[in-house]
Amino acid sequence: MMNRRTVIKAVATGGALIGAGVLMPRLAMAAWNTDAFKADNQGAAMKALLGAEPSASSDVSLKAPSIAENGAVVPVTVKTSATNVESISLFVEGNPTPLVAEFMIPAGTAPQISTRIRMGKTSVITAVVKADGKLMSASQETKVTIGGCGG
Amino acid sequence: MAGIMKVKAKAKKGATNVKMMAKHIMESGQRKDKKTGELIPAMFLQELTVQHAGKTVFAGNLGTAISKNPYIAFSFEGGAKGEELTINWVENTGKTGTETAAIK
């Protein structure tokens, strides 16, 4: 007989199975962190994703233009001299949701990532490197003349 | 089906440099339709994974602040000309894809 309890249980197991299927090929990689990506405040996004806020470090280098004409496409390169790098994440403080992306760096992959991001307005970009359990960051302000979030 | 990924992977001195671009609108869910004034629902690539010889060499969780037609460059140790990379992507809508690219 299907009472409320069994229905919930069935739904929960089904959901877990679907989740497992999606996660399978990605080994032990962190799943897409909904809380962190939806957070509208940079501090909250960092805490949700990384557990704490990072401290600035000269071991992290963030390369981004100081003036971006078009906020829809801002090229960014992050690299670090740290060893045992686990992940590199990018935040734009002034965006509606500051977390831009999280990149996992498996052993053997160089701790250097280039990508292109969107910025709604002039803001500080922060790159956070997680290495050896430590959180290190580098920040830079980029001025945006045309925002990348409007239509 | 033609893939959405454009990948340039080059083996050099024991490492492989990968530059990849996905053809994707990366709709953020914050834009309004100019005619109706309603929000256009979000549609973006959420996860990207690259594997080489059964090992994950790159994985990214992407948000809506990644530009349209996402471009990502990285490099990893190993890889040789003619070998294959497998790229898996997941859209926020649940749509997934697996594509391969050869290392040059």
Image (cartoon, coloured by chain):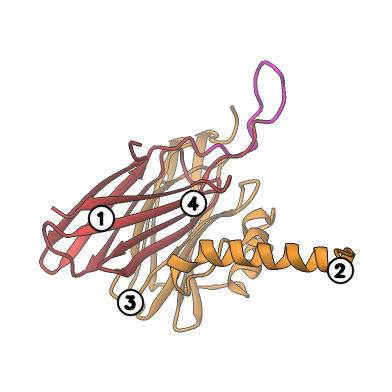
Chain colours: A orange, B red
Mainly helix, strand or loop, the magenta region?
loop
Residue B15 horizontal/vertical position (percent): 17, 66
Q: Nearer the viewer, mark 4 or mark 3?
A: 4
Marks 3/2: CA distance? 44 Å
Which three-letter amino acid code belongs to the residue tagged 3?
Ala
Residue at image location 89% in from the left, 65% down from the top: A3
Compared with B58, A53 (above or below) is below
B33 falls in the magenta region: yes
Q: Which residue is mark 3?
A: A107
Tell me which segment is drawn in magenta: B27-39
Closer-to-camera residue (B86/A3): A3
Q: Which residue is mark 1?
A: B18
Which three-letter amino acid code belongs to the residue tagged 2?
Arg
Q: Chain of mark 4?
A: B
Number of the label disc, if any, that sits on residue B90: 4
Residue at image location 61% in from the left, 47% down from the top: A95
Q: Nearer the viewer, mark 3 or mark 2?
A: 2
Would residue A97 appear left or right of B68 to someone viewing this image? right
Marks 4/1: CA distance? 19 Å
Which three-letter amino acid code belongs to the residue tagged 1?
Val
Q: Secondary structure beneath disc 1?
A: strand
Marks 1/3: CA distance? 16 Å
For label 3, the crowd category at 10 Å Cα-Cα, with few meaning under 14, some 14 to 19 and many 20 or more, is some
Q: Chain of mark 3?
A: A
Furthest toward the bottom, the residue is A132
Q: Secondary structure beneath disc 4?
A: strand
